[in-house]
Amino acid sequence: MDALVRPTVDPAFAAGALAFLLAGVALGTASGLVPGLHANNFALLLAGFAPSVPADPLFVGDDAATAVAALPGHRLVIAGRGREVVRLSAVGSGLAVALAVPLAGPITWLMIRWYPTLRAHLPLLLGAVVVALVLTESSRRAAVGGLVAFLASAALGLATLDADPAAPLSTGGVLAPLFAGLFGVPVLVDALGGDGVPPQADPQIAMDARNLGTSAGAGSLAGAVVGYVPGVSAAIAAVAAMPAVPSESVDRGFVVATSGANTANTIFALFALVALGTPRTGVTVAIDRAGVPFALPLLLVAAATAACFGFALVVLVGDPYLRIVGNADYTRLSVGVLGLLALVSYAFAGAFGVGVLIVAGALGLAPPRVGARRVHLMGVLIGPLIAG
């Protein structure tokens, strides 16, 4: 039965879908608020437990739709503009949803026709992405460090991605410990003994409407395109969008563009999964592993609804959250989440997964030490794809 018609004629189905959607919003909100946790961790855990869930498999796909999370620009937060950053993130995500809906059809139509050519030249395309990331670093030292980080993470991916270790979860794998180590553990380690968040000023957005729209549009378009390209993340899309961000609002524009890229990437990754049959993000990998039917209308409704919840929650929860984290014991919080990530890694890949988490975590600490962006660590996927 059609995924949009069925909820109107089957109240039990509609109630179940809503319940799982709200659970997904709660998990997505938690992933945004807890340092080191990512929506992919929860999505892959859900995929592992999906076979034992006594419910329609479609509900797991609803549950994997995550709320929009604010990722404040560090400099702005330190300057006391965290409340503004929260609103910039929410606006960027909201505008991305508005742009993604009308663009989804034509961009998907084009990508279906271009995909055979893209696939045939994928190593060249990904190589060009790597070169662009290195050349756009802020200094020669950062560029060299970024290249080394790419090569090291590529080697780590080549050594681990094909592994099939024994683990408590039958649908486990090394993706969760890899990404938790590369991008989660370093944040937590750096927060150990930190001074916390300083007092935050008023929430007024100090960015005019034109620059706001330009930044959101650039991030959304970049996120839409990379939704179809293997190994290229929303973080890379945000970097690609930066030339379009007005120079007088670069920090604020980065927050808006990043939020737009993340949200658009989530929506277009669903289209890529249905149209091309290949998952592009951690969430769509989880949907694929869990055997969720590709009912695009319902999955899109779930994603859009979660984005609306996220927009409201970012504004409602953001201000109290900033006050709470300003008084938090960062050492205890970081140690607790590090322990949680170790447990998750063990659940997915056993003792091997914990080892991968440790190695990836050590590697993830390196790029910022030389002034390079951590996005080079996406070499863990890009490298193996280039190598075929």
Image (cartoon, rainbow, N blue to C red):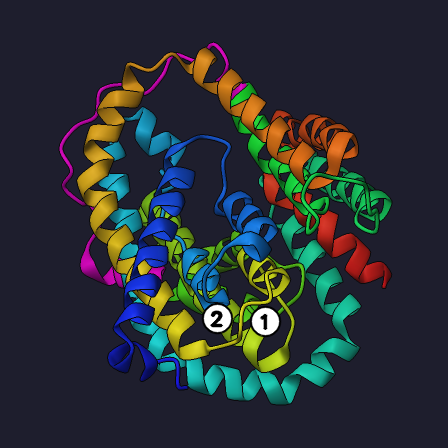
Question: Distance between the Cα atoms at labels 1 and 2?
Answer: 7 Å
Q: Report the side of 321 relative to 72 (left or right).
A: left
Q: Residue 71: x, y in percent?
A: 39, 41
Give the quarter of the image for residue 373: top right
Give the quarter of the image for residue 180: top right
Quarter of the image with the C terminus in it: bottom right
Whether residue 115 is visible: yes
Disc 1 element: loop
Query: Foreground: 354 or 326?
Result: 354
Q: Taking 358 as reference, is 255 above or below it?
A: below
Q: Taking 338 as reference, is 283 above or below it?
A: below
| Residue drawn at x 69%, y 31% as measured from the top left | 357
Q: Dot 1 corresponds to which residue?
A: 228
Q: Taking 88 as reference, is 365 above or below it?
A: above
Q: Residue 31: x, y in percent?
A: 43, 40
Quarter of the image with the N terminus in it: bottom left
Please provide the residue range marked out in magenta: 190-216
How many numbered marks does the figure carry?
2
Mark 1 and 2 residues: CB-CB less than 8 Å, in contact?
A: yes
Q: Residue 268, which numbered label?
A: 2
Whether residue 139 is visible: no
